[in-house]
Amino acid sequence: MLSAQTTDRAVNGVIGDLFSAYPTPEALAGASPGDLEDRIRSIGLYRTKARNIRAAARKLVEEYDGEVPRTMEDLVTLPGVGRKTANIVLSHAFSITAGIAVDTHVARVSRRIGFTDESTTDRIEQDLMALFPREYWGDINYVLIRHGRAICRARKPRCPECPVSGDCRYFRETGRHGG
């Protein structure tokens, strides 16, 4: 929930303090909006994130006895939780593979390589799930994120170094040979 429009490094910089102050869903549900906003202010969109965190914590307490749900259907009912976040929670917390988490890197790389022509994360996820066997779904997100950060960068893709450039639609269509 905290990662939208910010880096992992920025999120990692606030979670220690946040979880020390509010170690349970009950504590988060009762957090002062101002205090919660102050603790996450540095990651951007802090007002919306704080509101969603408190609302999700309240729902966890009221409807799930303070426990994080173990299904996609239940997780996406929590304020601020979409399929990407739900996929990551299911995978990391419960070792459940329900789909493929699609973030900005996964979307960009998937379109460039030619795995999808879609623009919405839900449709990109559906295309990826149809393309790859289920046993690989849990790894696809990380493989594409790493590739997007290291090689297939948003502004200056490093096509000459890319191990899949021969199978990449972007490379074929643009003829990019330099970074």
Image (cartoon, rainbow, N blue to C red):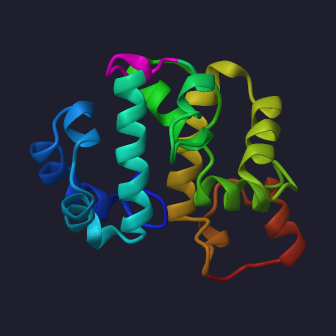
Above or below, comparing residue 41 to residue 146 in the picture: below
Viewer-nearest residue: 117 or 175: 117
Viewer-nearest residue: 1 or 106: 1
Viewer-nearest residue: 24 or 70: 24
For residue 147, what is the image quadrant? bottom right
Above or below, comparing residue 70 to residue 160 in the picture: above
Above or below, comparing residue 65 to residue 75 in the picture: above
Main secondary-structure element of the magenta-colored stretch: loop
Looking at the rendered image, the quarter that the C terminus falls into is bottom right
For residue 151, what is the image quadrant? bottom right
* Residue at figure coordinates x 83%, y 30% from the top left: 130
* Magenta residue check for 88: no
* Residue at figure coordinates x 11%, y 47% from the top left: 21
> Percent from the top left, x then y, of residue 122?
74, 44
Q: Please give the range of residues in magenta.
A: 63-70
* Residue at figure coordinates x 56%, y 24% from the top left: 74
Above or below, comparing residue 118 to residue 57 in the picture: below
> Percent from the top left, x then y, of residue 123?
81, 45
| Count of all numbered marks drawn on residues in the image | 0
Q: Is residue 121 left or right of residue 161?
A: right
> Percent from the top left, x then y, of residue 86?
53, 34
> Percent from the top left, x then y, of residue 84?
58, 42
* Magenta residue check for 69: yes
* Residue at figure coordinates x 35%, y 46% from the top left: 54
Q: Is residue 141 left or right of residue 20?
A: right
Q: Is residue 84 left or right of residue 123?
A: left
